[in-house]
Image (cartoon, rainbow, N blue to C red):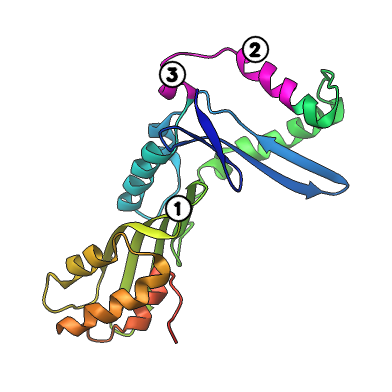
Amino acid sequence: MPAHYRPVNDVITATGRKISGTGAAEIGDYLVLVGNLIADFDYDTMVRVLRVPDEKYRDKVFQSMRKNLSTLRRETGREFDWGELAAPLVRRFAEVLGPLEPAEVPAAVRAEAQALAPRFLAEEWLFKKGRRFPQGREVRIAGGVDVRQRVHKSPGGLLRATLVLKKGRLEQVTLSGDFFCYPQNSVEELERRLTGAPLEKAGEVLEAFYTTRVETPGVTLADWLEVLGAKSRS
């Protein structure tokens, strides 16, 4: 299957979708490398169980996942067994790390996992209620692709922005809140202007927007930059 590496840690299909990701960290005296080949993925269940601020945000995450995240099954139309996936990985890792030998997970590690299981499988943990997102939420779909919701309380009312960011560009923009805006369709016009613009250029877009005789009592350009997560031009 044609694919290529996209820094920092993704493997991308010919259709531009992430199909593998890696990560690394130093834990104590050890360097830990994790990675995957996404054989299959249940998009519906993943989005359904994800803790999100609201259903509009959930829908944005689902759309972005379908667009930017793929699987071996989706790309090729067939199933892969463990040997097909593991053998090439072992061979390639051995070229870098030297000869590899199969090993069992240490008994102490299995014992620690069993000791932690009751806590992390308990309904109190799995269905914990009452978590709020005062500043919104951000979900990384793939390298350079994020679905973000931000909330900002301005003197003129609450602002909420639901954004899909791709390589620093505003791919989708939804704005809402309890503020006043005149004319009434101005919010939709601002969404249209921001869509497709680099986030770093949001200030320029807003300045041009406010030259069209738009009124947002108590909501300034700086408030919009705050809810978008963009830097001030000052």
Kindly identify the amino acid type of the residue bearing the numbered disc 1.
Asp
Of helix, strand and loop, which one carries label 1? strand
Of helix, strand and loop, which one carries label 2? helix
Q: Position of residue 104 (x, y in %)?
A: 82, 20
Q: Which residues are magenta?
A: 72-92
Looking at the image, which residue is at 43% across and 24% down? 75
Q: Which residue is mark 3?
A: 76
Q: Position of residue 28 (x, y in %)?
A: 85, 49
Q: Which residue is mark 1?
A: 146
Number of the label disc, if any, that sits on residue 51: none
Q: CA distance from mark 3 to mark 1?
A: 26 Å
Q: Which residue is mark 2?
A: 83
Q: Position of residue 36 (x, y in %)?
A: 61, 31
Q: Nearer the viewer, mark 2 or mark 3?
A: 3
Q: Does label 2 or label 3 sit earlier along the sequence? A: 3
Task: Estimate how packed mark 3 is, as few (under 14), some (14 to 19) or many (20 or more) residues with alpha carbons within 10 Å.
Answer: few
Task: Estimate how packed mark 2 is, as few (under 14), some (14 to 19) or many (20 or more) residues with alpha carbons within 10 Å.
Answer: few
Q: CA distance from mark 2 to mark 1?
A: 33 Å
Observer-nearest residue: 167 or 128? 167
Q: Nearer the viewer, mark 3 or mark 1?
A: 3
Q: Is residue 101 left or right of residue 71?
A: right
Tell me where residue 24 sits by quadrant: top right
Q: Does label 3 or label 1 sit earlier along the sequence? A: 3
Q: Are marks 2 and 1 in contact (CB under 8 Å)?
A: no
Q: Does label 2 or label 1 sit earlier along the sequence? A: 2
Above or below, 147 relative to 50: below
Q: Is residue 188 visible?
A: yes
Across the whole image, how many numbered discs are drawn on residues?
3
Of helix, strand and loop, which one carries label 3? helix
